[in-house]
Every structure is written in structure tokens, then in C-alpha cells.
Image (spheres, rainbow, N blue to C red):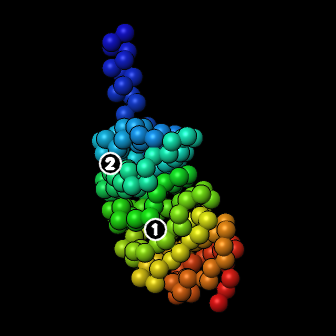
Amino acid sequence: MALVCKRLSALSVSPQLLQDVAITLEVDAAGVKAQQLLPWLARHASKILALKLTAQLAAGDPIPAGQWKALTASCLTAACAAGALQSLNLCGAWDISSWAWLPLAGSKLQWLAITLPAATQPAAIDIPLGHLSALTALQLLAPQVLVAPACTLPPALRFLAILNSAQAHPVPQQVRRCFTLQLYALTICRIG
């Protein structure tokens, strides 16, 4: 039995199986599962090319906001710091009020999709994205998506989707200057 378990354990972290990873967490009040995800990401992020992280906050006692923000930033930093990610898809209740982890994604990230539920804070992009030279697709679906004037779009961006599910906002100025876009989807925004 021990030999089978060792082989199964080795197989479960083989580089071929870790290239495309999808993880769903139900986050309890203590954030235990997210805390367990952090060392796993730190160990295996260099092998992960495509990562989908889904977070669902458990009913009842929610995790304290400050703790959840720190865990989110730590997990995303661990995932991006290895520099291997080509695709990152965040779904659910992640606290992305800080984008400090994104520059760590380096020059390999090609696809970034973020889908936040209606109960979350606005997705406010307040850092330049121009250094993400390989990013060709960016999709943001949130109750409110705000693009700060300091934000620059990646030079290779071809697909951009900004989908606000709650309020109308003007088209960001950066979009008007992005000549590489081939497809641009904008929902519930006013032009002007």
C-alpha cells in the first residue's frame, strides 16, 4: 500500500498534470483552505501554465475582510511569482482591491479573466498593465469596473471585455488609444 501511495503522490504533482489547474475553495471564517492553498501554490506555481481559482465564501460567519484581502494577495502573489502562468482565471469572492500581485505575472501571461459576484467591491484597476507584454486577452466582469487614469493597457491586447453588471460608466480613455484591439465588448457602460 505504501508504494502505491508514494506513486500516486508523485503522480499528483507531476509537471504534466499541473499545467492546467482548477481549484475551488469554500472559504470558512478562518480561511483555513486558503491558508493551505498558499504553500501548495508556492511549491508548484512554476509548473502551472493555466490556473482557474474559484472562491466561495461560506455561509454564516464570514472571514474578516482584512484577513481575506491578505490571503487573496498572498495566493495570487505565489501563483504569479514563478512567472510561468500563461492564463489566469479568477472567479468568485476574491478580494482584488489590490493589484500588486499582477506585475509578478511577468511576460508570459496571455489571458486574464476576473469574474466577481455582485456583493463584492468594485474592480478598480489602478496600476499600469503595459508591462504585461504578452497579455492578449483581458476580461473583467464585476458589479463595477473602474479603470484609473494611471492604468495603461498591454501593447499586445487584442480582446478586451469590461462587463459591469450594475452601473453605467464611461468608456475608459485607455481603450480609445488601444489600436491593437480586434474585439472589444462593453456592457452597461455609457459612451462619452
The relative height of residue 179 versus residue 63 in the rendered view (above or below) is below
Residue denoted by label 1: 135
Query: Of 148 and 160, which appears nearest the observer?
Result: 148
| Badge 2 vs badge 1, beta-carbon distance below 8 Å | no
Picture coordinates of residue 39, whole percent (x, y): 31, 41
Q: Residue furthest top?
A: 1
115 displayed left or right of 38: right
Residue 46, label in figure: 2
Mark 2 or 1, nearer chain start: 2
Say whether residue 163 is visible.
Answer: no
| Residue shown at the point (53%, 80%) measured from the top left | 180
Locate the N terminus and report the quarter of the image it occupies. top left
Q: Position of residue 140 (x, y in %)?
A: 56, 65
Quadrant of the image occupied by residue 132: bottom left
x and y percentages locating residue 2 in the rendered image? 33, 12
Taking the view exactly as shown, the residue that stands out farthest to the front is: 61
- Answer with the quarter of the image where residue 173 lies: bottom right
Checking the image for residue 6, the label placed there is none
Query: Residue at horizontal 69%, vertical 74%?
Result: 188
Q: Secondary structure at mark 1?
A: loop
Label 1 CA crowd tier, 10 Å (few <14, some 14–19, many 20+):
many
Quadrant where the C terminus is found in the figure? bottom right
Direction from residue 165 to residue 147 in the image, left or right: left
Tell me which amino acid carries mark 2.
Answer: Ser
Q: Amino acid at mark 1?
A: Leu
What residue is shown at x 36% (from left), y 25% (from top)? 9
Residue 119 visible (yes or no) = yes
**Figure disc tally:** 2
Residue drawn where x is 35% and y is 44% of the image: 38
Q: Position of residue 178 (x, y in %)?
A: 52, 83
